[in-house]
């Protein structure tokens, strides 16, 4: 919405939320979301044609086009638990629109939603007492956290799906004209509604599949003496394959990949396609195994126990240049180490201490529902220690773990870190961003994903 306002000064954009604390933060320079370039754009247009408000009804009444951009987490209860998307927030938004709207509206699905969710939105509005005319569009987001502003300003495509009726096509064109203020029309793809909804799930599934594929090969590389980066480079130079998303790591995270694939798996089961469901579920299984494999490697190399040992962890966000930690590999690695009674000391430049604790506490609720052994909150708060800079997190540590590929970790004073750690000083590079040879020269016992020791 900030980019809309920035590129379309003739359009008034109102971002509304029922949470007054979030709206208050958006009206300051301490934004609740960290994204390179976002603050500069917000400051440029805020108060001119970009506004943040808790007056939801008033915004609905005024708007000609309404974007539903609410959270659609995986259900943790009832039918579809653990796989299906929880659409209660979408339904609440739709019912509020139906209750308030008095004139014609274009309703745009911006949240990542299951195929045919638009039908539910239509049914809710048609079943209400509202008498306004409306069209529902699907406009899934293909930006990546950390590069979101550039992805929006210079996107390789925008997808808009709608009904193939005269009214639906008119609504598609209305949204197309907004994006056409800065993007060439040939990059704006117009499709039918269901194709647009499914395209978002499919895109994320394909990207996650590539990550799980190279991570599966990384395990084989470690056993055979191959180098996963060399394999990825050789494979990626094939123009039919390409080099993107072939970087081996401790595992993918974020708010989209796992949620969307699980949603896809649920849909396949729902429509009687168990083999297709099994195929896509394996992407998640492999990613979970990679995180578990990394944690178990740490425990194994530290003489099969980390009980009472200080483990320094660099990074908690699921990737660099974001403060988003949803489904981060760090959560699962920390959980396994804490289960083995380690003291986990963490530094991340953007994720707050409260968020880290909340992430681990939330994971325990998921595990409890599955019958898994859980950590008590007092144990988490006692043995998870968060530091404001990396050197304290690693001082007197038995091992250093690089979980997020923040650029600053490449330029840390690793000699200083080595001198401060207990010996042998173990270093586990879960992102393969460090110079292993130089670190071994210092004295570190280094382990990287998909690489043997030279």
Image (cartoon, helix red, strand yellow):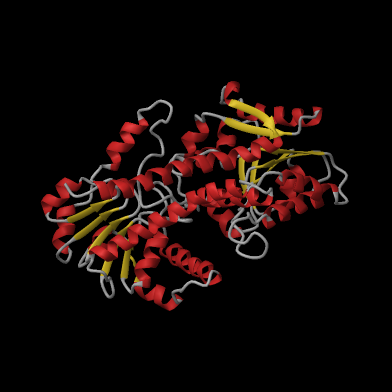
On the rendered structure, is 307 left or right of 382? Answer: left
Residue sitting at 39 percent across and 57 percent down? 291
Q: Nearer the viewer, residue 142 or 184?
A: 142
User: Residue 156: where, in percent of width, then height?
Assistant: 51, 29
On the rendered structure, is 382 left or right of 274? Answer: left
Residue 155 in sight? yes
User: Residue 434: where, in percent of width, then height?
Assistant: 24, 47
Instruction: Indicate the quadrant where residue 132 lies.
Output: top right
Q: Nearer the viewer, residue 16 or 394?
A: 394
Q: How many marks?
A: 0
Residue 31 in sight? no
User: Residue 307: where, in percent of width, then height?
Assistant: 28, 74
The image quadrant where one finds the N terminus is top right
Q: Is residue 139 above or below residue 357?
A: above
Residue sitting at 51 percent across and 30 percent down? 155
Q: Residue furthest front?
A: 275
User: Residue 121: where, in percent of width, then height?
Assistant: 75, 47
Q: Nearer the viewer, residue 274 or 406?
A: 274
Q: Is residue 129 above or below residue 331?
A: above
Q: Is residue 213 above or below residue 11?
A: below
On the rendered structure, is 41 left or right of 61? Answer: left
């Amino acid at each position: 919405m900030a980019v809309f306002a920035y590129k379309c000064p003739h359009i008034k954009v109102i971002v509304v939320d029922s949470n007054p604390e979030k709206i208050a933060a958006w009206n300051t320079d301490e934004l609740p979301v960290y994204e390179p370039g976002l603050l500069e754009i917000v400051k440029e247009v805020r108060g001119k044609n970009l506004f943040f408000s808790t007056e939801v009804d008033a915004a609905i009444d005024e708007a000609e086009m309404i974007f539903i951009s609410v959270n659609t987490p995986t259900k943790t209860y009832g039918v579809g638990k653990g796989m299906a998307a929880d659409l209660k927030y979408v339904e609440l938004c739709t019912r509020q629109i139906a209750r308030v709207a008095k004139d014609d509206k274009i309703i745009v699905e911006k949240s990542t939603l299951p195929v045919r969710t638009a039908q539910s939105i239509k049914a809710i509005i048609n079943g209400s007492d509202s008498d306004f005319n409306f069209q529902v569009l699907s406009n899934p987001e293909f930006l990546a956290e950390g590069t979101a502003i550039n992805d929006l300003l210079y996107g390789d495509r925008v997808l808009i799906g709608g009904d193939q009726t005269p009214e639906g096509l008119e609504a598609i064109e209305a949204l197309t004209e907004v994006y056409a203020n800065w993007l060439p029309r040939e990059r704006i793809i117009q499709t039918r509604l269901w194709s647009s909804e499914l395209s978002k799930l499919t895109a994320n599934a394909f990207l996650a599949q590539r990550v799980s594929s190279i991570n599966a090969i990384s395990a084989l590389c470690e056993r055979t003496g191959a180098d996963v980066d060399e394999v990825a480079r050789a494979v990626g130079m094939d123009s039919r394959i390409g080099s993107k998303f072939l970087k081996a790591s401790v595992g993918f995270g974020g708010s989209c990949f796992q949620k969307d694939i699980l949603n896809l798996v649920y849909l396949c089961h729902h429509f009687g396609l168990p083999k297709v469901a099994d195929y896509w579920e394996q992407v998640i299984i492999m990613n979970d195994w990679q995180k578990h494999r990394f944690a178990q490697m740490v425990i194994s190399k530290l003489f099969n126990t980390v009980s009472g040992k200080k483990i320094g962890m660099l990074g908690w966000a699921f990737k660099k240049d974001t403060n988003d930690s949803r489904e981060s590999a760090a959560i699962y690695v920390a959980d396994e180490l804490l289960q083995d009674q380690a003291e986990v000391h963490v530094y991340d430049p953007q994720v707050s201490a409260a968020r880290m604790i909340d992430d681990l506490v939330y994971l325990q609720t998921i595990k409890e529902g599955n019958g898994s052994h859980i950590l008590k909150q007092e144990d988490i708060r006692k043995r998870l220690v968060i530091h404001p800079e990396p050197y304290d997190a690693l001082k007197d540590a038995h091992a250093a773990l690089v979980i997020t590929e923040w650029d600053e970790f490449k330029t840390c004073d690793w000699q200083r870190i080595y001198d401060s750690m207990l010996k042998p000083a173990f270093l586990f590079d879960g992102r393969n961003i460090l110079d292993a040879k130089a670190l071994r020269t210092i004295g570190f016992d280094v382990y990287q994903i998909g690489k043997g020791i030279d």
